[in-house]
Amino acid sequence: MKRIDFDPQSATPVLPEVWAAMQPFFSEHYGNPSAPHQAGLWARDAVEQARKQVAQFIHAHSPEEIIFTSSGEEAANLAVKGTAWANERRGNHVVATELEHPAVLQSIEFLTQRGRQCTRVKVDAQGLVDPAAVRAALTDKTTLICVQHANPDIGTIEPIQEIGAIANERGIPFFVDATATAGWLPIDVGTMGADLVAFSPHRFYGPKGVGILYRHRQARLTNLIHGGPQEGGRRAGLENVPAIVGAGKACEIAAEQQLQWQAHAAALQRLLWRGLSESVPRLRWNGPEPGTMRLATNLHFSLAGVEGEAVLLSCDLKGLAIASGAACLGRSARLPAVLAAIGLEPAWARGSVLMSLGKDNTEAEAAEVLKLFPEVVRKIREMSPAWEK
């Protein structure tokens, strides 16, 4: 049975070119980048080349503004906690939207349990945050503003440039979580007005086990991991050289091909949006319609009378991989906070389904899903007391 992957948002396959770039650093050039001999120099030069590739990808001023971590979540933790601790004398207040990733929200919760304060800015029914609401939440003690570039659950693209202008006007550090958008939307940290940007290459055909944090050269940041002098003293620990090399190569390729990837995904998104709307009764779309306000890779909807997990498992048995919420919360019994934030009723939220699209998905796969998925939903509803009611 040929499987269809409509969950590349949780992970993508490593591109052949990326794997080819990584391979020598598992065996031939296995040295420690901190070592003073030739083997160490090979590894160190490779890490610095990757740093340049990442800096060019996001239009950073200098490669020195790139910090490699173990994951996008670690990068977010470093941005939130590191900025809060580095600016303790200035204030103790953080502003974030209700839609932020758990890595951001739990980092903020960690800080609030230790005396910091946080204002969570509400979003509208489409998941869109109003820049005026962000401005209204600021105080003279605010030391950080956190806003996602786009939400990975419902695909809403936020007005980052407008919020960045507000942050810069007030002289407040601005952190953007671009994990859902890197490789799919152009990222220019200067245009965004961002002081910190986190993302991970496993979302755009790079390796797992590496995350990236952009830090503006003037942004104050306290490190979380202590020990060696790696990453300019801001993230101690032996570098994962193969993964870092792969991250750099993935960024280089994405810089050239992301607009093509985006256009391909957008065409499939429109096809599926129309087809599912016509073939599945009592389906409710979450987030904006396809277009400039929604990620082209994202399809999130709710189904009446079914549980999202039951749909996921039934589809998996038939060879279709989908999701029912963020991958990092896949084993949680709680309703997604994102759906609560947009005001979705619990009955609809329990039936939520997330399909995501990548460059390798095809129209033939979309056509197969449009035949398979309505039948899965129909059979589950036949057995559902909630559907009978």
Image: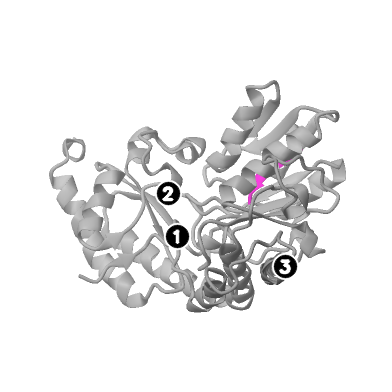
* Amino acid type indicated by mark 3: His
Q: Is residue 5 visible?
A: yes
Quadrant of image for the C terminus: top left
SS at badge 2: helix
* Above-or-below relation of 373 to 82: below
* Above-or-below relation of 113 to 203: above
Which residue is denoted by mark 2 in the rendering?
A: 327
Does residue 146 show up magenta in the picture? yes
Are the residues at dot 1 and dot 2 in contact (C-beta closer than 8 Å)? yes
Quadrant of image for the N terminus: bottom left
> What's the CA distance linking mark 2 and mark 3?
42 Å
- Give the quadrant of residue 370: bottom left
As drawn, the label of residue 37 is 3
> What's the CA distance linking mark 1 and mark 2?
9 Å
As drawn, the label of residue 11 is 1
Give the residue at x 58% y 52%: 70
Left or right, 169 with reference to 258: right
> Foreground: 213 or 333?
213
SS at badge 3: loop
SS at badge 1: loop
